[in-house]
Image (cartoon, helix red, strand yellow):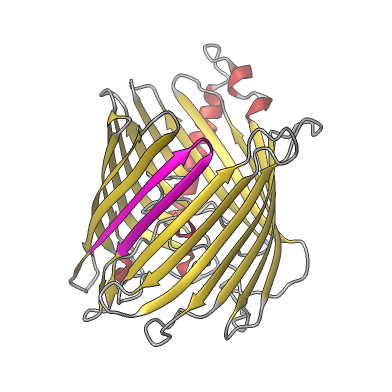
Amino acid sequence: MSKKSLVASSASLALASLVGAAALPAVAGDQFLSADGFYGDVRYRFENVDQSGKMDADASTVRTKLGFKTGVASGFQGLIEVENNSRVASGNYNDTHNGKDGYATVADPADATELNQLWVSYAGIEDTLIRVGRQAINLNNQRFVGTVGWRQNDQTFDSVLITNSSIENLSLAYAEIKQVNRVFGNDVADGEFRGTTRAANATYKVSDALTATAHGLWIDVDHAPAASTKTYGLRLTGSAALNDDWTLAYEAEYAEQSDYADNTASYDVSYYHVAPALKWNTLTLQVGMESLEGNTTKATAFQTKLATGHKFNGWADMFLGTPVDGLEDTYAKVAYVVKGQGNLLDNTKLVAVYHEFDAENTSASYGSEWDLLIAHPISTANLPGIKGASVALKYADYKADDLSAFTGNVDTKKLWLTTQFKF
């Protein structure tokens, strides 16, 4: 039996036992298996990619999630969730395994149905939660571990997750992961990372002005040893009022990464990210510098294989893998939420980000990028059973520079129209 099947089977047995336990007289079965536990999420997306050297890609897909979460009985709780991504209109694009390599890539496997989550948790130990099975894990800002929720197929983890908050202001988390189910789906060689990966996280809140997080990540990929790395980092965040109107917020992070497990390379590379921001009402002004070190001699660089990469280094996703010359991303961001208009514009979110990309250990420039977003919540007052709805238009325009420096940097434009309903 494969590891994937073993984890799923174990979780299935545990969930079946849990459901059986709900029938005992001591358990409030109506609350444990209430109809309120059913939920769903439907997201339509049109994505267009215009990329030099490729035919334009058009993808029109609907991602549907259906799930059930039990109540809590004797400290136990369970969840099962199925996810489907289907094409709703004809369109040509490379989904990484459909053979349409001449088209630009849209990394959403079409017409795919997967068991997205299946877990059982136990909270019978004071201030401690233990969760076993296939599950979503998002740590900190998702720079190192995340579900890549932007894509139509989630990244999930067949794992054991333990969290503890028994010490005031201190939150601890540890995950032992046997398989990572990546956004590309199970039909491609890179769709799963199999091996024992461990993640540890300790967050201590000193005050509103300072929260410190120490984290470690040990990635061991059996079938791709070059992806096996160990990373240790420290993250600081906080905010402080400057006056009655303005607040200063910041995030600062540093990490070191090196080879691990069966990785035959021998290297050490570093990472840092500094991003102060000024906030006034619903306006945010932010500047930042993120650096991922490269080692040209050993053809290695600081990588974040399990991250929600779309959140970082430009929405065009040109730098999901760090070039061997490293990456420096200098950016400026303006975000504003419309309030007080008394009309349809209220709660509309507007975001503009500008990036300059350079090599970390040479003088080469990779290029620049503009990212733009307008998003608006849809009123659900006249939509019975709908708990939330939204529509968003998003655009990324990457301009390449110094083509000899990085083979992946070609002019790329991406446009997304997304509508989502939760029930």
Q: Quadrant of residue 268?
A: bottom left
Q: Between residue 129 and residue 312, name the one nearer to us.
A: 312
Q: Position of residue 354 (x, y in %)?
A: 48, 62
Q: Quadrant of the N terminus?
A: bottom left
At horizontal 24% and vertical 51% (from top left) the residue drawn is 233
Residue 39 among those drawn in magenta: no
Q: x, y (%) of residue 419?
A: 70, 50
Q: Which quadrant of the rendered structure holds the C terminus?
A: top right
Q: Is residue 70 above or below residue 233?
A: above
Looking at the image, which is closer to me, 362 or 104?
362
Residue 272 covered by magenta stretch: yes
Is residue 121 something that shows in the picture? yes
Q: Which quadrant of the figure has residue 309?
A: bottom left
Residue 232's x, y, as percent?
23, 52
Main secondary structure type of the part rendered in magenta: strand
Q: Is residue 185 visible?
A: no
Q: Is residue 346 left or right of residue 139?
A: right
Q: Is residue 293 above or below residue 423?
A: below
Residue 57 figure quarter: bottom right
Q: Give the residue drawn at x 41%, y 43%.
A: 278
Q: Name the residue nearer the viewer: 416 or 105.
A: 416
Q: Is residue 101 left or right of residue 220?
A: right
Find the magenta span and give its range: 270-291
Of residues 351 and 153, which is closer to you in this image?
351
The residue sitting at the top extreme is 26
Q: Residue at x 51, y 28 (%)?
A: 18
Q: What x and y, as percent, mark residue 71?
A: 55, 24
Compared with residue 365, is residue 179 higher up or lower down, i.e. above or below? above
Residue sticking out furthest to the right = 382
Residue at 52%, 42% (x, y): give it. Answer: 283
